[in-house]
Image (cartoon, rainbow, N blue to C red):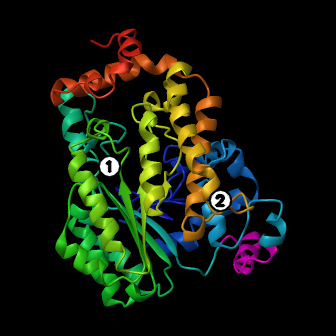
């Protein structure tokens, strides 16, 4: 399940928030405890999937798009957690899943006695960065900036973690959920959101820290010694490090960051995690048309350090930042870079015949990197031509650059012909 920054519930951490099914009013943590929602209201969603309707709406569309290009999707990741392989062995592994009894309950009765076990928790939009592909809902920096340049008029909803009733409902669910398996926290920037520490301390008070896996995603701009001290009490930790490429263009795309600081904190997390056997470091990326030609720098770093690289999906919004907005001559530059990286490394990694790889298994991390890089090549080669959106991109970048006093051409000078042909000046 997911709790969005305004406190609204979603049935899937991977689903697109604007799809038709999620526009139904699922409820909000300010009004109802997550366990009650999970056991009752979410039953409607489960029944829709059992009846096949999830495949007829946009609920699963982003995952299917990833799978069509050979990228392992969130849907497949969640299946792995229940012992189900999305292959020719689906029926056999489904029948043998330790969750089969719960699945059967859903067929006959949409309610369940289970409590939520796998969470994604949005802590609000407090953030010190203005990433060009982000949204004011996830960045207070962008909220302020967008209002200044006239892109945004309305105030973003107040974060649920500032609502005492919502926090009470959340903690009430935690207090009676001894089998929570995983919680992943995003923002905003979790490391500067006070509620993150408060929630971690509550998990410790309940001794859940001994068994739960906690994950979070940070933008590599801050290091908090007090928080690190709290995290040391969690034997199992997934650290998501957001960076688009190890090149100065990362500073343009993830505005507010500095590539030298990013690299320093990246290495700091890498070295710190080595002290803990149960700590896993992953690089989180959101490839756009501005960084896709430098994506190989991320794979190279991840390869050298045996990290996985994970993105939630192929970028959907803003649509004008999708890599498929690039004309093919520019896509080919990214394809060539990725292919050269694959050719250099592919024959040196352990391989696994199974097509759905657990990216968090250290024995197969490097094979996963190869397969992930191949998925972007497939996407760039076969993704639809969306170059007609280039004008929207130019308009957006020039609005940002007017206040930021920078220029994309200082970072990607060879984009000048295509950008200027759509009015960039």
Which of the two residues, 194 or 174, is positioned nearer the viewer here? 194
Q: Is residue 107 left or right of residue 412?
A: right
| Residue 303 rendering spot, x and y as whole percentages | 48, 56
The local crowd at label 2, few if under 14, some if 14 to 19, many if 20 or more residues have their Cα within 10 Å, is: many
Which quarter of the image is occupied by the C terminus? Answer: top left
| Residue 6 rendering spot, x and y as whole percentages | 34, 55
Residue at 29% in and 29% down: 411
- Does the magenta portion include 389? no
Q: Is residue 255 left or right of residue 93?
A: left
Magenta segment, prevailing SS (helix, strand or loop): helix
Start-end of magenta stretch: 94-110
Element under label 1?
A: loop
Residue 45 shows in the view = no
- Does the magenta portion include 107? yes
> For mark 1, what is the residue?
138
> For mark 2, what is the residue?
76
User: Is residue 302 positioned above or below 118 on the image?
Assistant: above
Residue at 37% in and 65% down: 216
Classify residue 29 by image quadrant.
Answer: bottom left
Element under label 2?
A: helix
| Residue 137 rendering spot, x and y as whole percentages | 32, 47
Residue at 50% in and 78% down: 181
Which of the two residues, 296 or 128, is positioned nearer the viewer here? 296
Does label 1 or label 2 sit earlier along the sequence? Answer: 2
User: Is residue 1 positioned above or below 143 on the image?
Assistant: below
Contact, CB < 8 Å: mark 1 with mark 2?
no
C-alpha gap between disc 1 and disc 2? 26 Å
């Amino acid at each position: 399940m997911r709790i969005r920054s305004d406190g609204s519930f979603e049935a899937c951490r991977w689903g697109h928030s604007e799809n038709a099914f999620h526009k139904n009013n699922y409820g909000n943590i300010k009004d109802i405890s997550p366990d009650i929602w999970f056991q009752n209201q979410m039953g409607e969603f489960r029944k829709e999937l059992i009846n096949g309707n999830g495949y007829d709406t946009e609920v699963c569309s982003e995952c299917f798009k990833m799978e069509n290009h050979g990228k392992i999707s969130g849907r497949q990741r969640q299946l792995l957690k229940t012992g189900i392989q999305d292959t020719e062995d689906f029926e056999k592994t489904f029948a043998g899943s330790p969750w089969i009894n719960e699945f059967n309950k859903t067929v006959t009765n949409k309610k369940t006695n289970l409590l939520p076990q796998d969470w994604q928790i949005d802590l609000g939009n407090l953030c010190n960065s203005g990433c060009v592909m982000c949204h004011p809902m996830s960045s207070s920096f962008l909220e302020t900036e967008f209002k200044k340049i006239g892109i945004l008029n309305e105030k973003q909803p107040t974060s649920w973690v500032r609502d005492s009733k919502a926090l009470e409902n959340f903690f009430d669910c935690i207090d009676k959920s001894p089998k929570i398996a995983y919680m992943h926290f995003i923002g905003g920037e979790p490391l500067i959101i006070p509620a993150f520490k408060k929630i971690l301390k509550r998990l410790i008070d309940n001794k859940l820290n001994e068994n739960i896996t906690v994950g979070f995603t940070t933008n590599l701009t801050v290091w908090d010694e007090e928080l690190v001290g709290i995290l040391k009490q969690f034997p199992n930790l997934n650290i998501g490090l957001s960076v688009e490429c190890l090149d100065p263009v990362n500073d343009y795309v993830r505005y507010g960051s500095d590539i030298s600081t990013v690299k320093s904190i990246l290495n700091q997390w890498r070295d710190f995690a080595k002290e803990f056997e149960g700590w896993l470091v992953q690089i989180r990326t959101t490839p756009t048309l501005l960084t896709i030609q430098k994506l190989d720098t991320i794979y190279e770093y991840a390869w050298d350090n045996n990290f996985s690289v994970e993105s939630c999906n192929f970028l959907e919004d803003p649509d004008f930042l999708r890599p498929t907005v690039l004309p093919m001559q520019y896509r080919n530059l990214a394809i060539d870079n990725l292919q050269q990286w694959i050719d250099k490394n592919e024959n040196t990694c352990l391989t696994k015949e199974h097509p759905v790889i657990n990216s968090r298994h250290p024995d197969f991390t490097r094979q996963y990197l190869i397969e992930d890089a191949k998925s972007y090549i497939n996407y760039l080669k076969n993704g639809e031509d969306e170059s007609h959106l280039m004008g929207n991109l130019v308009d957006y970048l020039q609005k940002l650059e007017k206040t930021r006093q920078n220029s994309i051409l200082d970072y990607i000078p060879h984009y000048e012909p295509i950008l200027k042909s759509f009015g960039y000046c």
